[in-house]
Image (cartoon, rainbow, N blue to C red):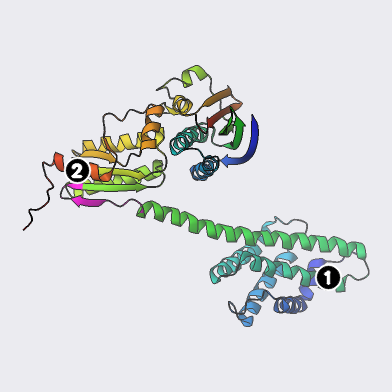
Amino acid sequence: MKLDTAKILQKRKKQILELWMKNQLVDFSLREDLMSNEELTVQSEELVDVLLQALSDVNLDDIHSIALTPVHEALEGISISRAKQGYSPRETGTFVFSLKDALLSILQQEIKNDPVQLLEESLKISKLIDSLGIVTFETFIKGREEVILRQTDEIAEISTPVIRVWDGVVAMPIIGTLDSARTQVVMESLLQEIVDTSSNIAILDISGVPAVDSLVAQHLIKTVSATRLMGAECIISGIRPEIAQTIVHLGIDLSGIITKATLASALRHAYSLLQLEVRKSAVK
Amino acid sequence: MIVLSSDNIRIAKELDMVLFRNRLKEYAVKIGMGLVNQTKLITAASELSRNMLRYAGEGTALIEIVNGQRQNGVRVTFSDKGPGISNIEQAMKDGFSTGKSLGLGLPGAKRLVSEFDIKSTVGKGTTITITKWKNG
């Protein structure tokens, strides 16, 4: 006689839940500070419900079946809410894996007389819960990746400020790697600021750019050309000695661009272009 | 040449290049390379890894500390399984590019390092090895 594992488990749902809760409550990693026992019971009950429901219409052999989608969804929800509450991935993992113990011991009680079948069914349950465990980790990592992506965007936004250093002179310090996406942001905000402040001199400071390779140079040349099209002059400052040597060896021609070693000398050059003079005031 | 330590980095997206450059800098600092040579090495490696990313989609960079010529150096091997370069002689010329860039990547990288070796088979991929000696 072939026993139906799903039916057995369905029938013993209450015991499974009780056993699982017992397992969880004795576990030292229980976080009562993050979630009350009642909440935990609700969460556990919800998962067991969905799981057993799915089991009854799915073949246990197939862990990729569509019938498991609701289980995955429930688990993803739990995983995300737990990640937000401050659970570590280990704790969430333990939460799911402890269900395996409960399911297996119930199975053991039910299929006492047939060791072969017990082994077979236990392996299937094991596999299923393992795959559910992986889902929790994947969700956790996905949540983290979203945070990282958002931060990357934020960094790109905040790291390109345009500073008005003098009437008609704007400066933009670039810090970090200058890739294509970043150049786009730099160019847009610089050109916009030139219009907004009706400046005619823009200083691009690259002291904070770790390496200037041919692509970065190409981006700089493009930015300078665009600035000139707007009728403003663009000065590139912050060329360190090692960067200067590297640019020469690479064979990049920056001779058509005004470059300065420091922001201060770029500013001085800007003053001279504006026919301004900075002097010490006469001592009174 | 004796290899003292090595590290293999996969480059599949632009963010990987940042990690790769930082790791390369660590290696260069470890053998006491001066700032100018460090910058040259990192710039050359940046050019080559960018080429790899652009034309082959992805590839790996193997960083090694090697000993030879009575001094230490950093050797980087870039390997990809991309389309390959059909005419290496042309690709090594200043100003030649199939991709609208300045065309200085390969020849520039060669000028920045002490040793440069390129092998490419069309349809199979490209392997470029560069070595920068501590004082070279």
Of the pair A158 and A247, the residue shown nearer to us: A247
Q: Whole-percent x and y of residue A183?
A: 36, 42
Left or right side of B4 for A237: left
Which residue is label 2 attached to?
A: A268
Three-letter code for the amino acid on which mark 2 is drawn: Arg
Find residue A9 and name its label. Answer: none
The residue nearer to you, when weighing A121 against B22, is: B22
Q: Nearer the viewer, mark 1 or mark 2?
A: 2
In the figure, residue B6 lies in which quadrant? top right
- Closer to the N terminus: mark 1 or mark 2? 1
Identify the subunit bearing mark 2: A
For residue B122, say whether it is visible: no
- In this picture, which residue range is highlighted in magenta? A159-169
Residue under the point 64% across and 67% down? A92
Q: Chain of mark 1?
A: A
Image quadrant where residue B117 sits = top right
Question: Is B123 situated above or below A133?
Answer: above
Percent coordinates x, y for residue A70 in the rendering? 64, 64
> Mark 2 packing: few (<14 Cα in 10 Å), some, or many (20+)?
some
Residue at mark 1: A107
Residue drawn at point x = 59 percent, y = 78 percent: A35
> Residue extending furthest left?
A284
